[in-house]
Image (cartoon, rainbow, N blue to C red):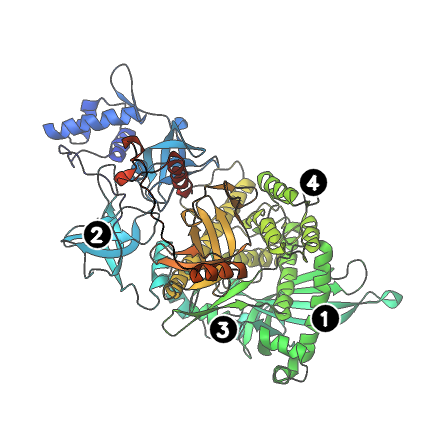
Amino acid sequence: MATRSNNNAPGTPPDYDPDVPSREEILAALRKADKPLSPDELADVMGVTRDATLIGFDRRLNAMERDGQLLPNRKGVLLLATKLDFIAGRVQGHRDGFGFLIRDDGGQDVFLSPKEMQKVLHGDRVLLKLSGGDYRGKPDGMIVEVIERRTNKLVGRFLNERGVFIVVPEDQRIKHDILVPPGEQGDAEHGQVVSVEIVTQPTRHSQPLGRVVEVLGEIDDPGMEIEIAVRKFDVPHEFSQAALDQAARLPDAVRRADLKGRIDLRDVPLITIDGEDARDFDDAVYCEPVELGTGTRKRPGWRLIVAIADVSHYVTPGDALDHDAVERSTSVYFPRRVIPMLPEKLSNGLCSINPEVDRLVLVCDMVIPATGSKAGTVQAYQFYNAVMYSHARTTYNEVWGALQQPGGPAARKHNHVLPQIHNLYSLYQLLAAARKTRGAIDFDTVETKIVCNELGKIERIVAHTRNDAHKVIEECMLAANTCAADFTERSKHPGLYRIHEGPTIEKLQSLRTFLKTIGLTLGGGEKPTAADYSAFLDSIRGRPDHALLQTMCLRSMQQAMYSPDNVGHFGLAYPAYAHFTSPIRRYPDLLTHRAIKALLVGRRYVPEPVGDTTITSKNMKEHEHGIWERLGLQCSSNERRADDASRDVEAWLKCWFVRERVGETFTGTVTGVATFGVFITLDELYVEGLVHVSELGTDYFQFNDSLHELRGERTGIRYRLTDKVQVQVARVDLEARRIEFKLVQGVSYDGLRKQAQRESEPEHRVRKAAGAKPDRGQLGYGGEARSAKTGKRAAASKRSARKNR
């Protein structure tokens, strides 16, 4: 059962008057006024007339002056404080009640105390001023104005506590309970999951008020974790009626009129290679050997055709489908369910390259030399509109099986396209060799797959092994994506690049410091390249600490994002890279298609602006760049939103999965180290949990950020990434999506032998004389004596147990 938060606003003062205007209302009234107002004039404007209300009104004005929101001048009129003195940003809540301000200017985060967090909800935009205090190296701040309320609806558990209706938010970053007035609870019953609309935002002295607008069901209903996640992270999960109507008007198949101006590739044996459970197929491939050059200068090569579903033919700029697509920016994948970017008629039907049906495609046709200095790199390419006919729907396992066993069942099933499969594999080996020469980084990571039962709960978690068939498609898609980026860049047409910058100075310094402690170095000096990383990873591949070193290299990287400013892709070692191959599920790919198709007919594609704010620019070029930049930010943000929602659902399912195993012991690997403990991933179940620092023993553990380890001051025991440990599942908190472990002491042969000897010896009881009665000053809590040394250790243990951000 959900529990109430312990961080709610304190009780209101006895003389608190709810009719006193809020700070936001006072600031809004002063902005609307044509001239500065005195307190009496402001009271008249706002309709404050009662004597009791005027007392509270004066108190609020004094508090706003104290907090720096208002500046009275010599004449006694109220002036708004200049915003230049304040810091703007977004509030990020923490499950322990405090929060941080993520600054708009990219500066250091500002700490917000639980008292300040009473005024706002996670996600709100605010102005604050620094209070001069400090919290663990971060400046302390005080909120002076809420610019924008971002949380107007949330999902949580509906509780009836002695006739008082409240909703406890599922998002642990929101510590307010939402009060639901009588009559606003709808059909909700105690314990059910509901969606509540915030009708009154929180203030310093009052909790938020809400109205139940949707009852989702019981907490253990199948699929409830997904219903919670899409609302918790504000993922659009219902298409607008206009988009559904537009999709319904689309034809069920390719029409003859759609073929105008397209190259007919229906006789080319293009095939799709996807997973067994895939439903949308947005790419098809074909490969054949060709001869390059003429006469005596002929040399072998390959022709690679990558055909991508022509989504832009059906989804045009500014229409209802486009509006919903840009709002989502990406499809969201959950176990057993997908929330698509486009309605099912498009994503699984008209735009999906299903077998043995005609489909409209945008083709990247490439020529790749097989020998010479440019072997494995695209020498020439062209884009064109086409119509195709998929000759086979194959899976990764089938293709890999056909390659391993030419006479096996998979090869016999796809015998009519087997030559093309072998051609694709030969080309892949060439592309893989070029990738290694280029210096692209390859991390050996273990991917997992969640297998669910009919009720949507985890049945098991298995390691997902990528075979060479996966890599065949990956290399083909990489080749097409680089051609798309090169085409727009050469044409000087703006677009969205998938950029991945090199490591920051701070992260690089941290990595080098760590490597120095074990006698290793990373080449490249102050600006290492992907080839330097790749060479280093190759050099440590046989070491027992290879996993640790690879993890440290991975954590030094920055996150990839979308931007119109091309800085290359560091990890893939490409000077220009864009997303082109998945327009069914990624909006940036659809934008790239539109840019390419515009260039093919000699035009320029300018997207429609997104967002409510206007773009200020000196000329048309800057205005156009601003539109692309805003699109890149929105697509990157929505991509992270989708990842967060997917991780939240997986965490929920894993908690359900492990809840039945409380008390069981497993072997695990340290996959994260923080000041408050170590994160352990179970080797058998692939589930991560926390061993809190208080469970590590009586020692005081120091956290070393550069070494990513916790080390005991007295014992020297240390816990670092990739260490193997034995843990016991201690507790599962479903609402917090948290699994807690306890360390199990290792058992050795000598330990068992000594224990057996102790048990076989007769028990001798020795009565000892009572010690001297301790002084009153030595008595601890409850009257128990404790030494000064023990007290210091306990205090140190408490300090180390505090959670950091």
> Does 366 sit above or below residue 534?
below
Residues marked 1 and 3 touching at CB (< 8 Å): no
Q: Earlier in the sequence, mark 2 or mark 1?
A: 2
Which x, y percent locates residue 155?
A: 30, 55
Q: Can residue 326 be seen here?
A: no
Q: Mark 4 highlights which residue?
A: 525
Q: Which amino acid lies under the numbered mark 3 shown in the image of this protein? A: Asp
Which of the two residues, 265 or 730, is positioned nearer the viewer here? Answer: 730
Q: Mark 2 highlights which residue?
A: 166
Label of residue 426 in the image:
1
Q: Residue at horizontal 24%, vertical 40%?
A: 9
Q: Secondary structure at mark 3?
A: loop
Q: Which amino acid lies under the numbered mark 2 shown in the image of this protein? A: Ile
In which quadrant is the C terminus drawn? top left
Q: Earlier in the sequence, mark 2 or mark 4?
A: 2
Which of the two residues, 579 or 623, is positioned nearer the viewer here? Answer: 579
Which x, y percent locates residue 83?
A: 38, 28
Q: Mark 3 highlights which residue?
A: 277
Q: Earlier in the sequence, mark 4 or mark 3?
A: 3
Spatial CA distance of label 2 from label 4 is 58 Å
Q: Residue at horizontal 59%, vertical 77%?
A: 398
> Does 629 sit above or below residue 185?
above
Q: Which amino acid lies under the numbered mark 1 shown in the image of this protein? A: Ser
